[in-house]
Amino acid sequence: MAKDKKLVEAITSMEEDFAQWYTDVVKKAELIDYTSVKGCMVIKPAGYAIWENIQHELDRRFKETGVQNVYLPMFIPESLLQKEKDHVEGFAPEVAWVTMGGLEPLQEKICVRPTSETLFCDFYANDVHSYRDLPRVYNQWCSVVRWEKTTRPFLRSREFLWQEGHTAHATAEEAEERTIQMLNVYADFCEEALAIPVIKGRKTDKEKFAGAEATYTIESLMHDGKALQSGTSHNFGDGFAKAFGIQFTDKDNTLKYVHQTSWGLSTRMIGGIIMVHGDNSGLVLPPFIAPVQVMVIPVQMQKEGVLDKAREIEQALAQAGLRVKLDDSEKSPGWKFSDQEMRGIPVRVELGPKDIEAGQAVIVRRDTREKIFAPIGELAGRIRETLDVMQKDMLERARAHRDAHTYTAHDLAELKDIADNKPGFIKAMWCGCRECEDALKEEAGVTSRCIPFEQEKIGDVCVYCGKPAKKMVYWGKAY
Amino acid sequence: MAKDKKLVEAITSMEEDFAQWYTDVVKKAELIDYTSVKGCMVIKPAGYAIWENIQHELDRRFKETGVQNVYLPMFIPESLLQKEKDHVEGFAPEVAWVTMGGLEPLQEKICVRPTSETLFCDFYANDVHSYRDLPRVYNQWCSVVRWEKTTRPFLRSREFLWQEGHTAHATAEEAEERTIQMLNVYADFCEEALAIPVIKGRKTDKEKFAGAEATYTIESLMHDGKALQSGTSHNFGDGFAKAFGIQFTDKDNTLKYVHQTSWGLSTRMIGGIIMVHGDNSGLVLPPFIAPVQVMVIPVQMQKEGVLDKAREIEQALAQAGLRVKLDDSEKSPGWKFSDQEMRGIPVRVELGPKDIEAGQAVIVRRDTREKIFAPIGELAGRIRETLDVMQKDMLERARAHRDAHTYTAHDLAELKDIADNKPGFIKAMWCGCRECEDALKEEAGVTSRCIPFEQEKIGDVCVYCGKPAKKMVYWGKAY
């Protein structure tokens, strides 16, 4: 049995070294592998299956709001990238440039898309003529490239997978409405599907997207008290439209510029799932999004009838619509338990000769290790109940953890003390000026995460300069 | 009414100019748009929805055979691309090279994947250790880049979407079995889902994939008599494994090289759907894959009760599981009929005041224009029947067209005559040597499409050199 436990013992505990724990989990749960291509990763079957489930659920929610999927080129000519001034300044330093096609140098260099605002604008400029053509509510699932110096699996890599929605509207009001609507889609998705509670709010001007009028964000808190920007939704106003000449003839027969939005959520959310729900035995997947929800593990498999019964149960559960697998490998039950726990499979069903004799099996929850004895005939229903409860409990536990690690700072000394000693969100008042934001980063190492929609008045003056405060802001250290 | 017909009149007839007809259809059915990025296209909602349905169905069939999805980087370092000699010779002349990351030149240039054999090999070299790790049956959905000089929407573009499967096996037999298995998956998919009949066979050495031991292909015939290579499946033997050092410890405790396969199908199949099924009114989509299967078009919409009834029917059909839309725009019924036909929506339901009075509606098939009168209460069932029959008829019609355009050549003069005057497949015997194959290309303008699995002995000697023949080959002009 000592040898069997190796799998668990091999990962670093999160209290000892959270970063190493994270790396251990992504490797041992076989979510990713490193490659010869610096800063890029292989997403292995167990990791990609999570992304497929995210895609499937998010795409369904998008389409309910009228989104249509499209595909635009992965390349952006330099001249196109340069059309919107703030945008090119934000992205040019971190793009990959293609300079040769086949054996010949290109006349104009092209970059691999870091994001596709410029391509969608170029497309809409030709595609939109009349108010009848609006709104355009398009989205694409693709990969993008940002030439990062330091990278981490899922959280920051040179290439990552995402969806990017890009819309064009007749009025400013409609664009703002769509921006908020998609932020809400993200927030509901994170809470309902991923069991990750989020704070909805607006980014400060310093932190907003290059070229946006307003950026909205959902922010979540990881187990180590660091924040993760989990999805963003941008309102561009008519800035891009003016740069790209996207005009339409309105009902009143005048020529107007469209108003645009964009919004994205990426594979970094898989990093979020790991860091919100994982524990020292490995990954814990929310049942809703888990590629495998149930692992059936026979005990004393060599005893007559055990494997047959286990197969029968596997089939019955699959027929009941559960995503189930049977571990009938030659390993010991102890090894299999550890392996199932490492992979974050939400429940296992233990089944031995004595269980079979008693007509029962044992359901074990991955998150709490709670054991539930259930008659074999009622297994599917009991597992479904268990998964539902687990999904809810995971959200509530994450919310409780976040609330317990959300602090209030009334002055700079207090803020610095929290930043140094209590990892988490820090709520503090802010005057709205960039200088104070820069200074807080410099002196306390925190960035503004968002100006939450749900404002609380926790003071009258800016935590840094002491001048009258305009907003309460969530501050923190972030991935 | 004259103005309403503009949509139909605007496309070139296929008899007059097939290439222009094709371009007109992809544009007017709003499948694609051109972009500022030379040789790349925008796949618009109507085009992308076809691809989504292809993905969904093919992915389902893949998974039934044990395929797992993964994602590998889009970049290949030059040194990795060069590891297999034939492969680099085949692809290096047509790749896009990234030479700058951000503001700095790269130490080693990297190309955007034209295909991912080298990346999978690099991955498997680290990932596969023991016979227990085999087989690996992985697939990815992604885009690839090939720097083509001349491009055409869907058929040949610098970037295109596809899936590429890459597998590793313990034995040569198992690799060959998987290669053929996936070819059969493609063939069944094309016939059952796309209503496109295919010829299954093996490529000649000249036409096989760079680095493969054997390439198998499915070939289909377009309406203009040109062939379309519709999917390929390659057996690499252990060639790549030796170049990349992919070894495993077998059951007998000896170190062996794996045997590998790869197989791909791309967005070019959308071009195939257009060119097999389309007509002079536009696109005709096979019901199975059509994003919208039914368009409800009210006639005399302004009359009381018509629009209400049309909406009621739309809802009832949607509830019955049909993919249905209602055209309630302000256009005339004639315009709407033309528009629905141009978009290739398999059936329309016409509904006017007199129909409502009679408790019926008219189902019109897109392919034959056949009108079917059906009681409103039975519409869903009758439409489903109609779609099923249409799907079968489309396959049979395409097969009849192909068979009617498949010729047999017994000598060179006959082959040249057919090649010049009768567009289609040409069956002819071949000695197996490269020189004759080159000469047929040179003198008759045809390439070998495949050596079909179903051989017929139509002569004893090679159609070109007169020496003893080894195989019957399908020849033709191809996209």
Image (spheres, coloured by chain):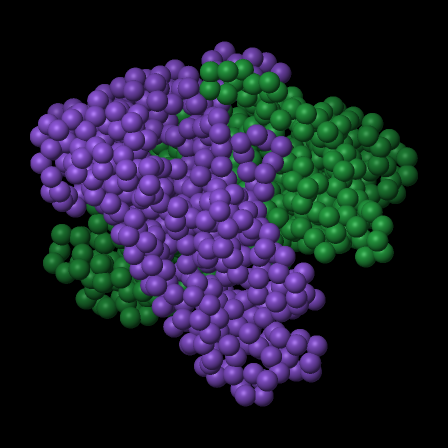
Chain colours: A purple, B green
Nearest the viewer among A218 and B36 is A218
- Reply above or below: B395 against A316: above
Q: x and y percent of residue B393 in the render?
A: 51, 56
- Quarter of the image containing the C terminus of chain B? top right
Q: How many marks?
A: 0
Q: x and y percent of residue A398 in the render?
A: 34, 55
Instruction: Evaluate whether residue B282 shows in this view.
Output: no
Q: x and y percent of residue A435 in the render?
A: 21, 22
Q: Is residue B184 left or right of residue A235?
A: right
Instruction: Evaluate whether residue A27 shows in this view.
Output: yes
Which residue is situated farthest in the right direction here? B468
Residue at 84 percent across and 32 percent down: it is: B433
Q: x and y percent of residue A80 in the render?
A: 37, 19
- Reply above or below: A347 against A51: below
Q: Is residue A356 left or right of residue A170?
A: right
Residue at 13 percent across and 42 percent down: it is: A458
Residue at 34 percent across and 18 percent down: it is: A89
Q: Quadrant of residue A209?
A: top left
Q: Is residue A226 left or right of residue B119?
A: left
Q: Quadrant of residue B155?
A: top right
Residue at 77 percent across and 48 percent down: it is: B248
- Quarter of the image containing the N terminus of chain B? top left
